[in-house]
Image (cartoon, rainbow, N blue to C red):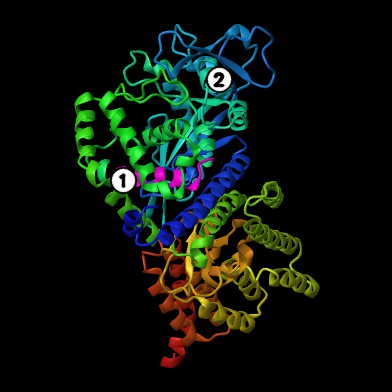
Amino acid sequence: MSTEKCEAMNEKSDLSRYLSLVSEQIERRIARSKYLTYFLSNKFDRSIVFSGRRSEGVSIAQSDTDFMFEAKGVFVNDMPNLGKSSDQVTQLVMDLTDVHPGYTKLLFENDRNDKDISEFAVYGNGLHSLCPQGTNFVSNTFVLDYWNSQSASILPDQHREKDLHFHGPCVLTAYTIMMTRHEIDVAISFKSKWPVVAEEWIRRERKYNWPSSCMINQIKEQGINLVPVGHANSPNKELEWRLSFSKAERLLVWSFNPVQQICMNVMKHFFNSQIAPKFPKLFPSYFIKIAMFWIIEETENCFWIEENLLPCLNALFERLVVYLEEKKIDNYFIPADNMMDAKPEDKLNSLKLELLKYKYNCNSVWLQILNIGMSTFDKNDIYYHHIQINCLSISRFFIYTKLFDLDYQTCLRNLEGARTILNGTDIFPVMRRHLISEINITKACLQFHNDCNKSKVHAERDIKCIEKKLQTGCALNNSTGKLILCTFLLYTKQYQEALTLLQDIEDQFTDLVVYYRIWERSKKPNDEDYDLSKPRSSFEDTMRTYIALDVIVLPFLLRIYPLSVQSIPTAEEQVLFIHPVLYTKVLKFHCHHMLQNHDECQTVFEEMKTYSAMKQYHSDLFSENIVANCEKILNKACIPIFNHKKGT
């Protein structure tokens, strides 16, 4: 790197440090994408493609969270299958006549499908009912209507907004958790082998051997998807389907070296902050990714090195300006598809002029974005581990929301199924061990509860046995270990033991603790409070010291939970997720109530009310209902005491 560039970056070590940190974080984000794709595909019993910027290691404001479901029992061929139709799938055929490049119509051949075995068979007359009258082409509009009708039952209901609406080929839904709204695009798609129309990409001569022949074969083997959306200018767009190369694009992005990944990240940050507000939806970030594919394929590998980071960014910027001048950006897999041809020319010209304003001070813009990026990469324990903790929270949510059924055998089957899924992947092994331990604790509670239902007498040996199993979970963290044990101590009338442990738990909830709930956390993990001079702790130490997960209340275990909590899951017909601090106070309240410590009971109740009123921590009515139930218990307990004091 030249002296001038070194001075601009302050020191070369700053850039090296940034590259190292970004590379590490991108690697973890990609691991998260792989884990979520694997885990959710198994939980939903269907193939899922986790795509969008988040899946590719890009993390900026309003990053996409996209999930593409592959329809069950449907497969698309790019030419008629002259043989017998498969017994495994219902087959469709691509029809590329009179369509824009990159799009196709899908023909449903009745004579080649003796019976419709796709998931659409339950929808009217199956796929045939999704063809407009008088045609055998599957309507993307009808499929979207079907998907809209099914999404509500497929997606988790808790914390989800009830209204779903279309967003291009996706159903847009939103989850509100701790007063933060998360929008998620969920698309339905048909799986297809690699199409002949994209065969040029497979055979294309590549001077610099990117992507490698091994990756090309891998991409071809996994095929593509067809998504229900037509070209914007097509007169028959309701019958057209777009060829989606999301799986191929994801593998290509995952193959980027750190400099290439940073180039794409920085450019997307630049467009998101400087360009998109002035030109909304005109130049999607997807174009930046496609530009990266082309420029990497056409450039020597030695160009993409740390010393060339700024020239690499400038080369990408100049490529985007050229696209705007030519009003053309070729699809990377089907070059005949100009993805810009539906954009208004006058707006593209205005955008080009806007970009040219930055042409002579590009380096300062890139450095500013890089410096902002460097400031967010403090290597404390929470930040280092938070991607795994995020996956842990999501996994817990999807596993335990399926335990709303009051049937004991159903709950056990769901727990065993979740454990099988977790054992099937080598991604985030420490996180998986943590979750499997929690599942084992829940299973022990279920078995004990089931035994209690059979007999009203609790054998001392059974109580000690379950208590010993719960003791093993105390090392997990405040919510999944100690609070479950405290719940059991309350149930078995060991009130003083529970109070001692509850006080220990409260003392651990310092300002350093970050509360994770599904996709949300109570504060940014890169706090300045952490002592970065100490060696980074292990994942287990981080979980014990800094992390608090929500307490999960299962309807099947109502008998074990405090009285103020028991009625709520039944009324709500779902699993409860309770803030650990609030639940700690609830348990203390009930222990003092059973010990007839009325003053302490009143004090804890006031603390509970104050904490529940902190709406930044609680967005649901569960906490309010729990507090209301505690108030009823308190009033019943205080009436005779009050009368006694009055001499009545």
| Bounds of the magenta segment | 255-271
Of 18 and 397, which appears nearest the observer? 18
Q: Mark 2, residues whose alpha carbon is within 10 Å: few (<14), some, or many (≥20)?
A: few
**Residue 582 at x, y percent in the picture:** 48, 70
Q: Quadrant of residue 631?
A: bottom left
Residue at (36, 43) in percent of width and height: 311
**In the rendered image, which residue does mark 2 sit on?**
203
**In the rendered image, which residue does mark 1 sit on?**
270
Of 552 and 213, which appears nearest the observer? 213
**Residue 98 at x, y percent in the picture:** 40, 8
Residue at (76, 64) in percent of width and height: 455
Residue at (22, 24) in percent of width and height: 345
**Residue 271 at x, y percent in the picture:** 30, 42
Q: Quadrant of residue 437?
A: bottom right
- Judge whether 338 appears above or below 622 on screen: above
- Judge whether 11 appears above or below 118 on screen: below
Res. 283 in view: no
Q: Which mark is residue 155?
A: none
Which of the image's four quarters has the C terminus?
A: bottom left
